[in-house]
């Protein structure tokens, strides 16, 4: 009978060790899942920020191109008609351009204000000014 009692105690201590191993394994697995969840959340936040920065960069490039297009348009109009004074609101490529031509002594000054809708709902604005001299006549 004594040997059966020893066997039973040995079995119980073996089962206890097995339960402890399982519990520590499950605890380690839960910790690993928590770490992976945290890393996934961090990567998602960083990816969203990169996406937003890409949109802002796209807006800036579109704005600069729109301002250059406004200057080119003003130069073309001045070449056709020297009395051209500008345009109040000109829709170009998804944005608006305001062109003002000002007389400056011997030449003129082209002032362009370009605006595009921004990603955040606001508007981005770029102002450019260049000098213009009429090409010599034939």
Image (cartoon, rainbow, N blue to C red):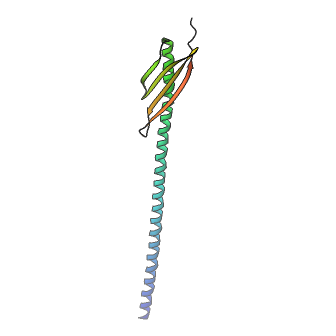
> Which of 17 and 64 lies nearest the eye of the viewer?
64
54 vs 6, nearest the viewer: 54
Q: Residue at x 47, y 50 (%)?
A: 45
Front one among 3 and 89:
89
Please indicate whether residue 5 sits to the left or right of residue 102 in the image: left
Picture layout, residue 19 above or below residue 106: below
- Residue 112 locus on image (x, y percent): 50, 25
Quarter assignment of residue 12: bottom left
| Image vertical order of residue 91 relative to residue 19, above or below | above
The image shows residue 34 at horizontal and vertical percentages of 45, 62
Report the residue that reaches farthest toward the top. 138
User: Residue 62 in the image: x percent, y percent?
Assistant: 48, 31
> In the rendered view, would you say 27 is above or below 5?
above
Residue drawn at point x = 44 percent, y = 65 percent: 30
Q: Residue at x 48, y 56 (%)?
A: 39
Numbered circles on residues, count = 0
Residue 23 coordinates in the image, percent (x, y): 44, 73
User: Residue at image x 49%, y 49%?
Assistant: 46
In the rendered view of the protein, which quadrant contains the N terminus? bottom left
Query: In the picture, which quadrant includes the C terminus?
Result: top right
**What is the residue that sits farthest to the front in this orientation?**
105
Q: Classify 61 as above or below 72.
A: below
């Amino acid at each position: 009978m004594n040997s059966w009692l020893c066997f039973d105690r040995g079995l119980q201590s073996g089962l206890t060790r097995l339960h402890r191993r399982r519990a520590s394994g499950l605890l380690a697995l839960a910790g690993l899942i928590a770490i992976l969840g945290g890393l996934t959340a961090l990567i998602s936040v960083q990816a969203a920020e990169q996406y937003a920065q890409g949109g802002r960069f796209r807006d800036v490039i579109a704005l600069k191109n729109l301002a250059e297009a406004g200057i080119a348009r003003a130069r073309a109009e001045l070449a056709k008609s020297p009395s051209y004074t500008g345009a109040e609101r000109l829709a170009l490529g998804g944005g608006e351009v305001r062109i003002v031509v000002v007389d400056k002594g011997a030449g003129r000054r082209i002032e362009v204000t370009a605006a595009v809708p921004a990603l955040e709902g606001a508007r981005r604005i770029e102002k450019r000014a260049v000098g213009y001299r009429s090409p010599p006549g034939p």
